[in-house]
Each structure stands twice: as C-alpha cells, then as structure tokens.
Image: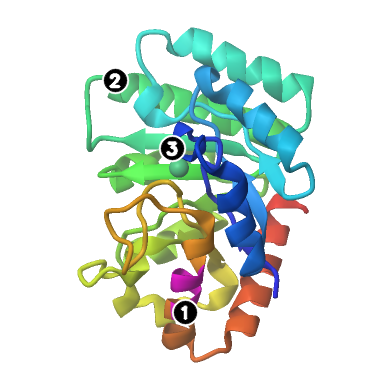
Amino acid sequence: MIITDTHTHLYSEQFDEDRNEMMQRAIDVGVSRFFIPAIDSTYLDAMLDLEKSFPKNTFLMMGLHPTHVKENVEEELAFVKEWLDKRNFYAVGEIGIDLYWDKTFLKEQQYAFKQQIEWAKEKNLPIIIHCRDAFDEIFEVLQEVKDDNLFGIFHCFTGNLEQAKQAISYNMKLGIGGVVTFKNGKIDQFLNEIPIEHIVLETDAPYLAPTPFRGKRNESSYIIKVLDKLVDIYGLTPQEIAAITTQNSKDVFGI
Ligand SMILES: [Zn+2]
C-alpha cells in the first residue's frame, strides 16, 4: 500500500526532537510520499535539510503562505520567484487567502495569490490553495484566472457540497485531512457525493490531528485515521482508497 500525504510540514520545529522516528512511523504504515508546502523565506533552510535527509520521499513546494503576507510582501514574493527560477519544485504553495486571523492585509493577500498563480501557470505547476474564512474571495480570484493551465489542490477543504463542486470546476482536487474525522467537521456528511477521483489525502501536520489525537501534535502516520474514514464514506477497501488517492496525487504533481 502506498499512501501519499499531499500536505505535511515535516520541517516544522515541532519535529526537531524526533523527526527520524516520526518519519519511520509513517513509512511503516505505508506513507512513503510526502509533499511539503512552503510558508515563507525563513523556513526554506529547514525544507532543504529535510529534502537532503529524505530525498526519495519528500517533494518540495515553493510559495508564500497567506498568513505570512505582510508589509514585506514584495521581498517575500521576489524570494519565491527567485527560487522557482533556480530549481525544481512540485507545486506553488501554499498560497491563498486567510481572513480568520487578520483582515489587515487582504489586498496584499489577493495580490500575492494572483501573482503566484501566474508563476505556477508559467511553469506548468499546480497550485496548493489555503482558504480560511475566504471562499468568496478565493473563488473571485479563481474565476478571474481560470483556464486550462490552472490546476491544483484545495488544501484542507472544509466547505459545503456546493463549494466542493465549485472548487472542482476550477480543476482543483479536494485535500481531505483530519477534519473529516471530527464530530462537527461536516464534510463527512456529503463527501460520498463527490467522486473519489477528486480526492487526495493530507495531514497538514503538525496541525489538525484527526480523532482520537485531536488537539495533539499531528504527524503523517495519523493519515491512516483519515484513510479509515474514507473507507466508511466510500465503501472501498483501504488498499483501494490508497491506490486511487495516490494516483490522484500523481495526476496533480506529475510524480
Ligand atoms: Zn499547511
């Protein structure tokens, strides 16, 4: 069984004490492909170190996270562009709009989102979207930029059925993680109406640990809890869920 964690921050300082053991726990349960979203320039060294330690398993992205868009947005974007031109990355992400924490930089967030989508298109890369309290704002941008070159993943999808269909209409897969296991997570109520061809698995580790680890540090091995939930929802075997969602991830990332 090959399971793909399409969104995991394995370079986080929260894993500094036991990163090798944590990675081994994931590999032991079949999680062998890890896609690593960027946050901002300050994390790049840790990402490159991670890649050096696990070159066969980790696939890096480049991008500026919306909660890290502030006064220095131009410098951070220049950094993203410089690195996108310098070496290979597997996606532009995570990018998007987050109005949950702070609305101060909404204009800058919209600008950074659009700019990075342009670069993704130029390089024929998928985008990985972070959306929090911002479906309208995100869809407004996607509507503007949609074309055959636009594709990617709506990471940590937590919307309703209508929003799920809308995301898919822009060539996005839905990244499903720990929230699907939450009692009040809501997406488990309608996910069976979304064909599994549109679904990829993720943890967003160290955040959003699935039940029964909710509130604790998340890690990629816990993706099994997400997979088990999809077994219930879709009535498929774990092997089938793993195979289909891994294939979906290959369709997005090209590897
Ligand atoms: Zn993330």
Residue drawn at (78%, 25%), measured in percent from left and top? Answer: 87
On screen, residue 125 above or below 184:
above
First in sequence: mark 2 or mark 1?
2
Query: 14 left or right of 211?
Result: right
Which label is found at residue 228?
1
On screen, residue 121 above or below 85:
below
Ligand 1 - quadrant of the structure image: top left
| Quarter assignment of residue 250 | bottom right
Taken as a whole, is the magenta stretch helix, strand or loop? helix
Please name whichever residue, 241 or 104, is drawn nearer the observer in this view of the structure.
241
Which label is found at residue 105?
2
The picture places residue 134, in percent across and down from the top left corner, at 29, 42
Within 8 Å of ligand 1, the CB of disc 1? no
On screen, residue 105 above or below 211:
above
Please name whichever residue, 200 or 113, is drawn nearer the observer in this view of the structure.
200
Residue drawn at (45%, 49%), measured in percent from left and top? Answer: 205
Residue drawn at (62%, 30%), measured in percent from left and top? Answer: 47
Q: Quote the CA–CA distance across marks 1 and 3.
A: 26 Å
Q: Which residue is mark 3?
A: 14
Mark 2: amino acid: Phe
